[in-house]
Amino acid sequence: MAHHDTGYKELFSYPELVQQLIEGFAPTEIADIIDFTTLKLSNGNYITPLFEEKLEDLVWSVKINWQGKQQEAYLYLLLEFQSSVDHSMPIRLMHYVACFYDHLLKNKTTTPRKGLPPVFPIVLYNGVQRWSAATNIYDMVTPEPPVFLQPYQPHLRYYLIDEGAYSDTELVEKQSSLSAVFSIEKASNRLDNLQQAVDRVVMHIKNDPNKKRLDRIITRWLKRHLQRLDASVNLQQLNSLVEEQDMLSENLQRMIDNERMHGEQIGMQKGEIKGEKRGVEKTARNLITMGMPDEHIIQATGLTREEIQVLRQESTH
């Protein structure tokens, strides 16, 4: 089932976090040619999806220093929040990029004679399973065409950032508030590690030149994220991770305690069920020893005929 997080999309509506994404998770060759001071958010609503489900997309324009001069390029940032891998993603991306180029032509941002600007399509994926879909639409063409046909096949590759593929150590080494956000995402399944990840994001915010702005952005995202994990958590009064860290720590501890209590209750329930079943089986064994027929044992214990036959076989060994 798809999971769309508007709060997560909001994070990448700010240039500093897009810069952290490119510098920390994209190839260094890309980061080295980008002038991040020229990042400008474009409107992505013009994109007409080929599929019924609308994905969360963002388009940034940026100047790149290439071949001795500055040129304009577009970062097509596609935020993908499905819990399962989408094997149609190469087709989606080809459709989206084509619609994007069509938009540039219709708005006279460029012309066919001037040519089309380069794009860097990114799929940011935060699902539990590791991404296994093709990253180039050409790889979906099967069987592989003969050499003379290969140049005529579609070619479009996207760059995949699979959050879950990074180890905790790798995320820590990246030393950015965004890498700490990814750590929080990973820690969502291990609440004991959540406090540590939150402490790290607060540390990076404190050391950032734009800490007030970054604090406000990430605080909004974290409130949504934590309330989605535990609807009972009360974060209405939380407006700053930096200034109200103690309040957040108390709520995190409450979430951890609730999770432990829930786990203990499930364990007790499972233990009670196992205990009841052992008691029923003991009664059935006694009735078998007394020579009672299966019909009477079924009525007395509620066991199935197959379960009683297993117990009869065990009693003969």
Image (cartoon, rainbow, N blue to C red):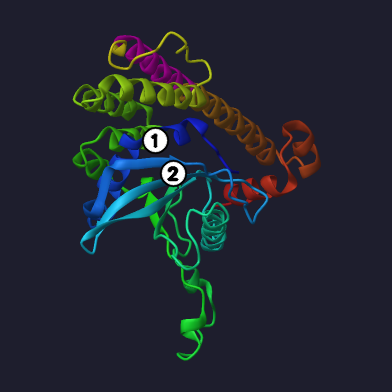
User: What residue appears at the point 40 percent right and 17 percent down from the top-left corner?
Assistant: 257
Q: Is residue 261 left or right of residue 103?
A: left
Pointer 2 local density, CA inside 10 Å: few below 14, some 14–19, many at least 20: many
Instruction: Please name the residue that numbered disc 2 is placed on.
Output: 126
Number of labels in the image equals 2
Pointer 1 local density, CA inside 10 Å: few below 14, some 14–19, many at least 20: many
Front residue of 5/285: it is 5
Three-letter amino acid code at the position of disc 1: Glu
Three-letter amino acid code at the position of disc 2: Asn
Front residue of 196/7: it is 7
Q: Dividing the image into 4 quarters, which one contains the N terminus?
A: top right
What secondary structure do most residues of the magenta stretch adopt? Answer: helix
**Mark 1 touching mark 2, by CB under 8 A?**
yes
Instruction: Please name the residue that numbered disc 1 is placed on.
Output: 185
Magenta stretch: includes residue 259: yes
Q: Is residue 77 left or right of residue 177?
A: right
Give the mark nearer the N terminus: 1 vs 2. Answer: 2
The region drawn magenta spans 246-262
Q: Would you place residue 211 above or below residue 41 in this image?
A: above
User: What residue appears at the point 34 percent right and 33 percent down from the top-left corner?
Assistant: 181
| Element on which disc 2 rests | loop
